[in-house]
Structure formats: C-alpha cells, structure tokens
Image (cartoon, rainbow, N blue to C red):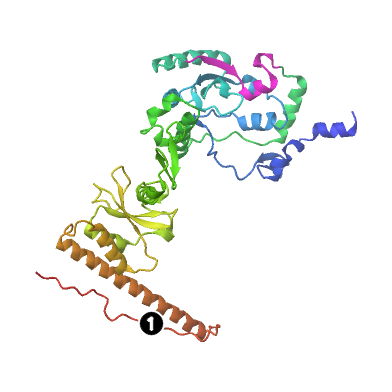
Amino acid sequence: MALYEVIKKHDLLDPIIKDLMKMVLVLNKEEKVERGPFVMPSFENPWIYSGTESGRNCYLWRDIYLYKYGMISRNCLNCWKIVVRLNHVTELIKINKLQSDMHEENPSRYNGKCGMETRPWCTHKGRYAAFWYVPMYDKEPLTLGRQIVKEVDERLKDLGITERVILKRGCTELEERYGPSDKWVYLKEQHSFENELDEFFAIEPDPQVKQAKIIKTHILGEWLEYAFKTGDPTAKDFVDKFPGGFGIRSTVDYYKDNLVFVSGIPRKGRLPNVKSERKSEQKNRRQSSQVFSDYRRINVPDATMVASVGFKRQLWALDPELDVVWDYISKRWEIWRFPGQEKKKQKRWNEKAHHIMTVKTKKGGFRALGADILLKLQAGDTHKYTLNQLVNYFDQLDKNVVRANEHRVRNAVEGLNRDMLSYAHGYKVQVPKAYIIDVPKETRVKRLLGG
C-alpha cells in the first residue's frame, strides 16, 4: 500500500473537518475530539421523549460513526426497539400519554419517543411513529424486547389502537444504507477501526435530562399543524373552528359563483351601466370599510401607532362600547363599536363588531376631530346622548386639548434648554434661531349649559 493510501486510511480528521471549523466538534489538549461548547437543545425536534437510557450514545454511533465514517457501530448491532406506525394524531396523543405513564412505572425498562415521521424515507410507512427502546445492556436484550412487544401491544389495544407492533434492530437509517438488518456483517477490520475511533473521540453520552415542558408544548402544536397539512381528518378534534382555526379561508371561485370584479369589490350579477356606476362605487366603498380584516388591529404592537388613551376616554364618555382600530394598509385610524364589551378596556373582535367612522387628523386638532366624531355619532338622532354624556365628552376633549398644548410647550422649552446647554459647553448652535413659545392663556372650552 502506497504512502497516500496509508495516510487516507488513518486520516480521521478529514471527515469531520467542517464540524471542527464550525466548533460543533473541538480538539482538546489530549488530541481527542469532543463536542463543542455551543450544544443547544433542539427546538425543531419532531419527537417528545419519555426518558432516555443511560449509556446510549446515539450521537456518536449514528451522527459520527455512520454519517461521517460510513460504518455500523458494534453497539447498533445490539440495539432493539419496539415500533408502531400511526396515521392519526388522536392515536399519537394517546401513545404520548401511555409512554409517559409506562416510564413512570419503570424508568429503567420503558424509555421511548413518539412524534411526526418527517424523514422522506419513512413517511410512506405512516404520518407518525412511536418507539420503545429495549435496554441495551441487558443480558438478553432480544428476549427482553419480545416481552416488551407483547406488553406494548396489550396496552395499545386497551386504548383502541390496533396498529401493528414490531420489534426492529438498529436505526432506520442503517437499513436504508446497508439493507435488511438480518444481513448485516461486522468484520474484523471494522472492529479494529472502531477501536481506533473510540480512542480518537471523547464524546460522552447525552446526560439524562428531561425534555422541557415548554418544548413539549411547542412540539405538540407542531403535531397538530402537521396533521392538518398532511390531511389527517382527526385534526379537527383539537381545533374549535376547523379549518378556520388554522387561519384557512375558502378561495373565491369566480367561475362557479358567477362573480364579476367591479370597482375593486367582487359582486354577483352583471356589470352596472354607466349611470349607476358612480353610485355603486360609493356604496361598495362604504361596504368595504365595514369588514374587519387581518390588516386591522385593535391593540397595535407597533409602539409608533398606539392610540391616545385620552382620546379613548373621550370616546368612552359617550359610548363605552367604542374603540379605536388601526388600519395599517391605508394608514388610518378607525372607530368601531364592540357590542357587549363596554366593561373591557381592551376590546376583542367578534361578529357583532361594526365600523362607525374613519378618523382623519392630518389638518385638524382635538377640537375639530371631537366635533366631527360627535356629528357623525349623532347623525339622524340629535337626542341620542344625554346631557351628562355630552358634558363628560367635552370635559375629556378639554383635557386632551390641555395635554396637547402642554406637550407642545414642554417640547419647545426642552429644545431651548438643549441649545443653551450646548452653547454653554462650546458646541455649535445654528444661528439665527428664533424661539416662539405661544402659551395659550385659556384652553378650557367655555360652555353655557342651562334650561
């Protein structure tokens, strides 16, 4: 054997060089490879675990020995597991509870996992899968595995699950790469090479740490979404509104429903004539503003688009069922009524909610806005609100005006103070610069209320 072939045969660094560069693996002072310092729990794991066996080092045997060096570890030849394939998420959730109960009964005997089968070479066998791992270091693991198969099969039948339960050897990835497990052969050359790998790697088995509850909750949600995506009919048992609970809306069929597109609004029937086109457009525009779509928000998360609390109090003085809604498509504020929610400060949309008016404040202040809102709310009924409601409404309006003026004056004074401070410290100040602070002498609305 030439020198190059000898070097390549004993070059254990080449298959893992990329992992060393990324610090997934590191070379320690003893010139052995161990896991890097940035090992984090997997948040995209499709499996929920119910205990792990001490000493089972699947990361080393599968991810390193198999994927990097292309060999079956001797430990995998002694790995047995009970498997059941499923197609309904209802059964998966039952098995998750069963595995947890069995692990609590006997932690050293029953360890396993269950979840989504997302591997492309396994999805044809079932949407979901559940595994029970037979203790590897038992004197007769194969005999013990056959006993556990019977136990699992009986427990599943008690739950109404009649799927086939099997006992398999090693990981599915090994069978896909090297064929049926009863045909595996472990040669002497492999034995000596694995001894060399064992000396080179100092990777200990993962500690027996319980999977965090918050991760299990996240994975459970992923199960239900996966069930919906793959057409699992039992997904509807876990969603209040199916399929609307997943945000799925039916698509408009313009052929089937005989729809035509008029002035940006789909309508049934024929196209309008020229005379009625303008009236139809105005009517459609009014109707379009009364649909609470996804682009409207009651409680806006953007800090730059938070409705004034004082303005809300002004509305609530007239009608506590009113609230402000932000339309972030048209960049406008809207006023909506939420019947039955007069005692709630944070309104929630429901089918009873309806649009009242759109707020335009570019050229008007609180007074102009307050008058426009009152006229709009009183349209058709000038006696709609009591005298006390109107007084409270204008009192809140006055407070908003005072607060707006105080804010304007405060900003002007703070700007003057900043420039004076900059001047005192020798910073450059733009000149000439004039400060005009117009402090209103009286901001409260004078009203005459009498009989």
Specify whether 33 is left or right of 407. right
Specify whether 39 is left or right of 259. right
Which residue is more in the foreground, 301 or 109? 301
Residue 340: within the magenta? no
Percent position (x, y) of residue 93? 43, 26
User: Dot 1: few (<14), some (14–19), or many (≥20) neighbours within 10 Å?
Assistant: few
Q: Which residue is mark 1?
A: 437
Which residue is more in the foreground, 219 or 124? 124
Does the rendering let one see residue 74? Answer: no
Q: Amino acid at mark 1?
A: Ile
Does the rendering let one see residue 85? Answer: yes
Percent position (x, y) of residue 374? 25, 62
Percent position (x, y) of residue 68? 71, 32
Q: Which residues are magenta?
A: 163-184
Q: Split into 4 quadrants, where in the image is the N terminus?
A: top right
Specify whether 183 is left or right of 39. right
Percent position (x, y) of residue 174? 66, 23
The residue lying at 51 percent from left, 85 percent from top is 423
Which residue is more in the foreground, 357 or 192? 357
Q: Split into 4 quadrants, where in the image is the C terminus?
A: bottom left
- Can you tell which quarter of the image residue 123 is in? top right
The residue lying at 35 percent from left, 33 percent from top is 240
Q: Is residue 56 above or below residue 307?
A: above
